[in-house]
Image (spheres, rainbow, N blue to C red):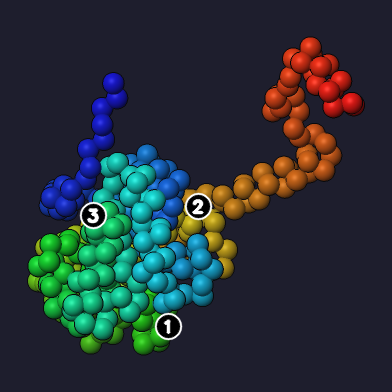
């Protein structure tokens, strides 16, 4: 009998930081994607609101709703046996009040069956993070470039390049850490700043465009596999050109159908000759 996979707990992940073991994290948005990345041995899966762009065709993350997040979190959590699954809180699901934030975090955590939730924001979100954690829901922070409010940051640009901006991000990280977040995504910030933050906070730091010195790294599923063609950020390494591979497979299928090369007998069910003869008589053909 195969040994059952052991689910990674938050203490397991914290131990990895303490021991200097790098943590791998990737997004996933469906049952097959969840199966695939979990089998590969990923440590953390983020069901991110990036699904708005890569799965739903929105121009950004802000249109994503709670209902859409739940619809994608549920199949991923059903698929995953080992990885820690994080559910992303969409824009305006936690921004109005602490009560709203706790309610919606509870929906993702309870109904979605994820292992923790993630929300964007630094010092301004510290009390909200603290309240969600006090309600019994493990929480992931996210500072630097925060896509939900990128318009206020001047667009999708590197953050923390000036002295004042860097100091603010350090203060943001400390506030999120002291609020109790067990991990923080550091997005699009200079690697030297990410190193300082990683040394300063107890929380696990997960970089995306933040250099090697973070405790772990995250990329979007579609970016890694070359499945998203609208743009590729500087920090993305494309590990496979799955788009072209899948496109060729579909084109080959179309060609074989048109040329009557598929389906051959190998892919077809057949009937016994005597049954076919009787059926032909019955049908008059």
Q: In what element is the residue under mark 1?
A: loop
Q: In what element is the residue under mark 2?
A: loop
212 or 42, which is in the foreground?
42
Which quadrant does the N terminus fall into? Answer: top left
Circle 2 is placed at which residue position? 225
Q: Are marks 2 and 1 in contact (CB under 8 Å)?
A: no
Q: Residue furthest right?
A: 285
**Rendering coords of residue 256 (x, y %):** 78, 39
- Which one is in front in this view, the residue at disc 3 or the one at disc 2? 3
**Rendering coords of residue 83 (x, y %):** 28, 46
Q: Is residue 174 left or right of residue 285?
A: left
Please report the residue visible at 18 percent of the width from the left and 77 percent of the height from the top: 99
Circle 3 packing at 10 Å, graded few (<14), some (14-19), many (20+), is: many
Tell me which numbered mark, 3 or 1, is placed earlier along the sequence: 3
Residue 115: which numbered mark, if any? 3
Which quadrant does the C terminus fall into? Answer: top right
Q: Residue furthest top?
A: 274
Distance of label 2 from label 1 (alpha carbons): 25 Å
276 or 67, which is in the foreground?
276
**Rendering coords of residue 43 (x, y %):** 28, 48
Distance of label 3 from label 1 (alpha carbons): 31 Å
Q: Is residue 137 left or right of residue 40?
A: left
Q: In what element is the residue under mark 3?
A: loop
Tell me which numbered mark, 2 or 1, is placed earlier along the sequence: 1
Q: Is residue 128 left or right of residue 154?
A: left
Distance of label 3 from label 2 (alpha carbons): 25 Å
> Is residue 176 visible to the viewer in this orientation of the structure?
no
Q: Is the residue 126 above or below the residue 265 in the image?
A: below
Circle 1 is placed at which residue position? 155
Quarter of the image where one finds residue 180: bottom left
Circle 1 packing at 10 Å, graded few (<14), some (14-19), many (20+), is: few
């Amino acid at each position: 009998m195969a040994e059952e996979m052991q689910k990674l707990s938050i203490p397991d992940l914290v131990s990895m930081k303490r021991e200097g073991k790098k943590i791998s994290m990737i997004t996933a948005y469906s049952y097959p994607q969840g199966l695939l990345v979990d089998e590969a041995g990923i440590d953390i899966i983020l069901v991110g609101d990036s699904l708005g762009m890569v799965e739903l065709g929105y121009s950004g993350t802000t249109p994503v709703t709670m209902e859409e997040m739940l619809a994608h979190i549920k199949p991923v959590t059903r698929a995953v046996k080992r990885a820690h699954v994080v559910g992303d809180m969409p824009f305006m699901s936690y921004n109005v009040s602490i009560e709203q934030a706790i309610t919606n975090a509870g929906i993702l955590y309870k109904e979605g069956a994820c292992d923790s939730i993630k929300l964007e924001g630094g010092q301004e979100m510290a009390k909200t993070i603290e309240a969600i954690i006090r309600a019994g829901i493990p929480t992931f922070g996210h500072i630097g470039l925060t896509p939900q409010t990128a318009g206020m940051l001047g667009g999708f640009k590197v953050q923390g390049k000036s002295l004042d901006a860097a100091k603010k991000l350090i203060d943001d990280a400390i506030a999120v850490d002291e609020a109790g977040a067990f991990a923080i995504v550091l997005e699009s910030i200079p690697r030297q700043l990410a190193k300082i933050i990683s040394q300063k906070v107890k929380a696990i730091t997960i970089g995306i465009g933040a250099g090697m010195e973070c405790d772990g790294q995250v990329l979007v599923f579609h970016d890694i596999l070359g499945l998203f063609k609208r743009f590729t950020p500087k920090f993305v390494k494309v590990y496979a050109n799955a788009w072209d591979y899948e496109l060729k497979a579909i084109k080959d299928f179309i060609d074989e159908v048109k040329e009557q090369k598929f389906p051959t007998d190998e892919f077809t069910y057949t009937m016994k000759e005597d049954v076919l003869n009787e059926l032909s008589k019955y049908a008059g053909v």
